[in-house]
Amino acid sequence: MSERILVVADDDDGQRLDRWIKRHVPDLPYVLAQKLLRKGAIKVDGKKAKTDQRLSGGQSVRIPPFETAGPQKEKRARPLSDKDAAYIRSLVIFDDGDVIAINKPGDLAVQGGTGTERHVDGMLDALVNEAGVRPRLVHRLDKDTSGVLLLARSAACAKALGAAFKGRDIKKIYWALIAPVPDIHDGTIRAPLAKSTGNYEKMQVDEEEGKPAVTEYKIIENAGNKAAFAAFWPRTGRTHQIRIHAALLGSPVVGDGKYALKDEDGNRLDAALTQGMEGVSKALHLHAARIVLDHPLRKGVTLDISAPLPPALARSWKALGFSTNLKTDPFDELKR
């Protein structure tokens, strides 16, 4: 295989070299790319490059000849069908030319992985603009969580949004059904989180090694003591943060099998709802309902984007007599 000289597009300005290579040289295995970078074999404008180096539009990247060890299975991207293209377009709830927002369903993954072929990232070709620019993911939602998911139409927008998500300049309001109703109806949950030592797919509270995790919460409505409509504002962005913090209240998110709590008889606390009440779905009842942030590229402009509940969750809200059209901000008195 001969060497390749690739020119960085203006739209890729500011992107990390290793991520750029992964996207533009998909046949170069990640481990091998890291090895070539350490050896100085990959060069930017003729100079040895570093893994975390930021690229600028117009720079040239030299990829040396490389061979993979043994036969390689060719990875082919799942072709985008007309049906999927129409589907992802139907999810768009906001698009100002810089920022796109979709209302992600609760059964659609954001990115691919083992056994996951259909996902948001795999459909983004359908949202390419007139200049041929493909939108970029800037944050994540769990596969089972529905609601507002932001995309950026340029590298500059993606960089600005990424910085905003790393800080505390964004207000993200989630709606959830939790069961039973907690004793205290509003407050702040502080519990550091880390990867579970027993299950790599789960997180756990870890006071010594965990990263800080802070969540504001408020009960909006309750159906006696059996269930509540709760609003959550995660001040930090840890994996499964709301789900674990809700469980710490003694009131896990309804439909959350991963962090469910059980009574003395071994029954899940949400069993009476998901198994015994007509109209209540067995899905995870967690929805990214609203996001408020300063526009990443337009000074003085505030983005305030809301996503309606998906049908299955809306039926659950109605079955319990809760409003599905909350207009007020439960955390209006708290600063971003």
Image (tube, helix red, strand yellow):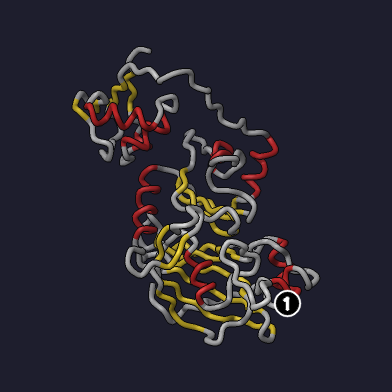
Q: Position of residue 292 (x, y in %)?
A: 46, 65
Instruction: Work out whether 130 lies above or below 276.
Output: above
Name which quarter of the figure residue 276 lies in.
bottom right
Residue at (44% x, 76% y) in the render: 189
- Residue type, numbered disc 1: Leu
Q: Position of residue 85 (x, y in %)?
A: 64, 39
Instruction: Work out whether 15 lies above or below 328.
Output: above
Element marked by disc 1: loop
Residue 273 visible at all? yes
Q: Position of residue 263 (x, y in %)?
A: 64, 77
Name which quarter of the figure residue 273 lies in.
bottom right
Residue at (51% x, 50% y) in the render: 100
Instruction: Work out whether 226 lies above or below 232.
Output: below
Residue at (64% x, 52% y) in the render: 107
Pick the residue in front: 244 or 129: 244
Residue at mark 1: 320
Name which quarter of the figure residue 147 lies in.
bottom right
